[in-house]
Amino acid sequence: MRLIDTAHPFYRPKWRRYLLVAVPFVWASVEWSFGNPIWAYLSAAIGGFLAWHLVLNWRPDSTD
């Protein structure tokens, strides 16, 4: 079961993929600054998951 469908056209623009990766890391820093380490770790884990799928393992589909 895939949690994120990287073949969806929504993820095609590079700026959108990088923005989706950056937002959870920014939110993790906000949570950390307010003293909520559990939520910071959770947000950072989501950002890491998105980075793995949308940046590091990105394969542009050849069906276009």
Image (tube, grey):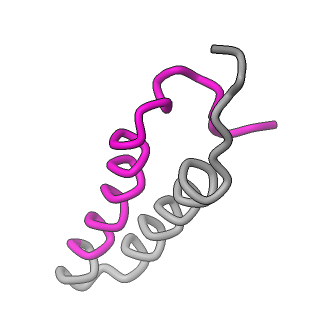
Q: Nearer the viewer, residue 63 or 34?
A: 63
Along the horizontal axis of the image, is 4 left or right of 51? right
Image coords of residue 14 (percent x, y): 41, 41
Q: Which residues are magenta?
A: 1-30
Please state which of residues 14 and 32 is positioned toward the viewer in this rendering.
Answer: 14
Give the farthest residue toward the top: 64
**Location of residue 7 (image quadrant):** top right
**Main secondary structure along the magenta-highlighted residues:** helix
Q: On the rendered image, what quadrant is the C terminus found in?
A: top right
Q: Quadrant of residue 1?
A: top right
Q: How far across and how far down the image is residue 33, in percent?
A: 19, 83
Task: Locate residue 43, reporting x and y percent.
Answer: 42, 64
Q: Looking at the image, is 41 positioned above or below residue 25?
A: below
Residue 2 x, y percent position in the rendering: 75, 38
Closer-to-camera residue (13/38): 13
Q: Residue at position x 31%, y 55% from top?
A: 23
As for residue 23 lying within the magenta part, the answer is: yes
Q: Residue at x 54, y 54 (%)?
A: 55
Q: Examine the structure image and report whether residue 63 is included in the region drawn in magenta.
A: no
Q: Is residue 46 left or right of residue 56?
A: left
35 on left or right of 9 = left
Residue in view at x 45 percent, y 70 percent: 44
